[in-house]
Every structure is written in structure tokens, then in C-alpha cells.
Image (cartoon, rainbow, N blue to C red):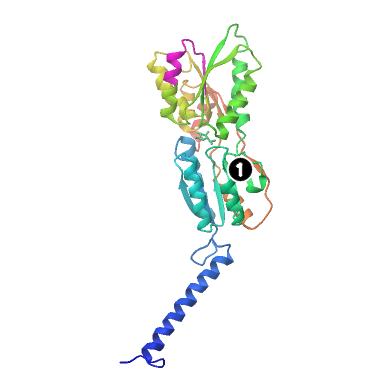
Amino acid sequence: MKRTRNSLPFRKAAAVLTAALLATGMAACGNSDTGGGSAGGDDKLVLGFSQVGAESGWRTANTTSIKESAAEAGVELKFDDAQQKQENQIKAIRNFIQQKVDVIAFSPVVESGWDTVLKEAKDAKIPVILTDRAVDSADKSLYKTFLGSDFKKEGRLAGEWLVEQKKSASGPVNIVELQGTTGSAPANDRKEGFAAAIAANPNLKIVASQSGDFTRAGGKQVMEQFLKANPKIDVLFAHNDDMGLGALEAITAAGKVPGKDITIITIDAVKDGMQALADGKFNFIAECSPLLGPQLMELAKKVHKGEEVPARIETEETTFTQEQAKEALPNRKY
Ligand code: GYE
């Protein structure tokens, strides 16, 4: 049968086509109404989050906190794990921009090199929140706010405790330092805060300092080298619990008693670290909280609505001795 404009099959096909066009048109409208991110027509906030990786107990607890809080807050989370590589984070952020998410949050693996991609987000009118780690961009308009810890203070608290412990030392106290990821805000700032505090006592000397990349394997490997190269190590300052835990193996293998022959100071206070402290293997921990999820969701909602938020929001933290760790352990959340 020949199809003319007025034949029934033609009219049916045209009707179906019109309905389909209308539906896509409406979906597209819905998108632009909510800033482009809420695919599917509902008005759920879409948050793109680029995580550093899964290098430590701290990071795993941080990821859990973010995922759980997103679900509780009714936020649609697009989560990407960058495996500790800046190029992967830049790729993830570009993907989020392309997908037109409502808000982008990320924990920058290193401090430098973000201006170009942050400018792309700004041009696309997608607000950015920094969580946990800072960037060194001079242009503060490239992000809305920073949520995280005062890493310099953590380093300072660790150093001040050591100064107090060693105040009656008559000879040199040799310190080795396991730094976090090279170029990261917590490695830079913890190093600086600790060095400033121990300057109070000229007997306290850092004899070796190297990155263990915030991992247990890195901590173990670098501590082995430290032990081989330095006959007398009195103190280990590790920028996180995981590197300290890795170093424990190297110290024991070298026939030394951790917590006694070598005083061990770390940062984070995750469960495994607190257990080592309670067991007398570590001597002191400066806390760094990974539970940033709930505050991040609140901030994401606010910046999406265009509300003003403080430029910097700092987490409240404390410190633990061995006795305090024993008390705190049963109620520790991470
Ligand atoms: O201390 C460490 C993690 O950026 C505060 O990263 C975070 C640090 C944390 O790998 O364990």
C-alpha cells in the first residue's frame, strides 16, 4: 500500500515521532532547570567527587563517610578513585564538567597544578569544594571553600609533645621522618609544623627524611633504609599511622623494640594506629579526622543554592597518649 500524507500508517508514525521529540525536549528542559545535573527529571543534587585513592586507613574511612553521607542526604554521588595520580583526578574533573554535575568536590593529591582545570569548572559555572587537602592556586575564586584539617597544627602538636618528652636529654636525639606523598598539603604542612616545634630544642635533630607515600608498604621500605643507614635512631615521626605501622615491621626485623628503643609519633588516629598506641608500640598520635562526609553534603547543598559559605572550615581534633588511646579505642568510629 502506498503511504500518502493522509494515510493512517503515516499519521501514526508522525504521532509517535512527535511524542518522542516532546519527551526528549522535556527531559532536556528538566536538565537545564536544575543547572544541568539532575538527569532523570528529579531535582536530586548531583555531586562529582574525585578521591585521592585508597592509600591508607584514613582514606578508606573518608570514602565511607562521603558515600554514606551522600546516601543519607539524598545526594546523587558520582565517585572516582584517582589511584594517587593527579592526571587521573584532572580527567575525572573534566568528566564531571562534561556530565554537567551540579557541584564538584575533590581532595587534591598534590597542591600544585590545578589552575587550568579549576578554571574550566568555573567557566562551566560548576562550583568546586576542596575537601581534606588544599591547592596552592593564587586565584581563590577558583573554588568556593576548603573543608579539612590544620595539618601544620598536627605537625606542631607532634613536635611539641616530643620537645616535652626530651626536655632533659643531655645529648643529641636522632629523629627520622617518614613524609607523606611528595608535594601533598599534609606532607608539606606536617613537616613544617613539626620542624618549627622541635626547633625549641637544638638537641632534637632530623637525621633522615623521605617520602613513604602515606602507605604501609612505603613506610616499611623506607624505614628499612633508614635503619641500615643510621646506627642510632631515637625517634620516628611518621606523617600518618599507616607508614608508622609499616615501619613497625622493619624495626622489629632489625631487632629493636618499637615504642621503647625507638619513640614513635604518628598522625591520624585510625583504629589500627590507636591499637598500636594502646599496645605500647606507638608513643603519641595527633588526630586527623576523616569524617568529612556530613559537612561536605551540607556545603554542597549551600553552594548549589548560591548561598555564602565560609572560605575555610576546619575539623576539630585532639591528640592521644598511650593511656588515652586505651580509653578511647572502644568508642572509636574509624
Ligand atoms: O593523613 C593520610 C592519607 O590527606 C589528611 O592522607 C589526609 C592524609 C592522611 O593518606 O593517612
Q: Secondary structure at mark 1?
A: strand
Q: Is residue 228 above or below residue 131?
A: above
Q: Mark 1 — residue? A: 147
**Residue 228 included in the magenta stretch of the image:** yes
Picture quadrant where residue 156 is located? top right
At a point 54% along the width and 33% down the height, the residue shown is 183
The picture quadrant where one finds residue 8 is bottom left
Measured along the vertical axis of the image, is residue 170 above or below residue 46? Answer: above
Tell me the kind of residue under disc 1: Leu
| Residue 235 percent across, percent down from the top left | 52, 16
The residues colored magenta run: 223-237
Residue that protrudes farthest toward the left in the picture: 1
Please give the name of the residue rendered at 49% of the width and 15% of the height, measured from the top-left corner: 262
Tell me where residue 286 appears, x and y as whole percent: 57, 28
Indicate whether 273 appears above or below 135: above
Looking at the rendered image, the quarter that the N terminus falls into is: bottom left
- Which percent across, then down, holds residue 168? 62, 9
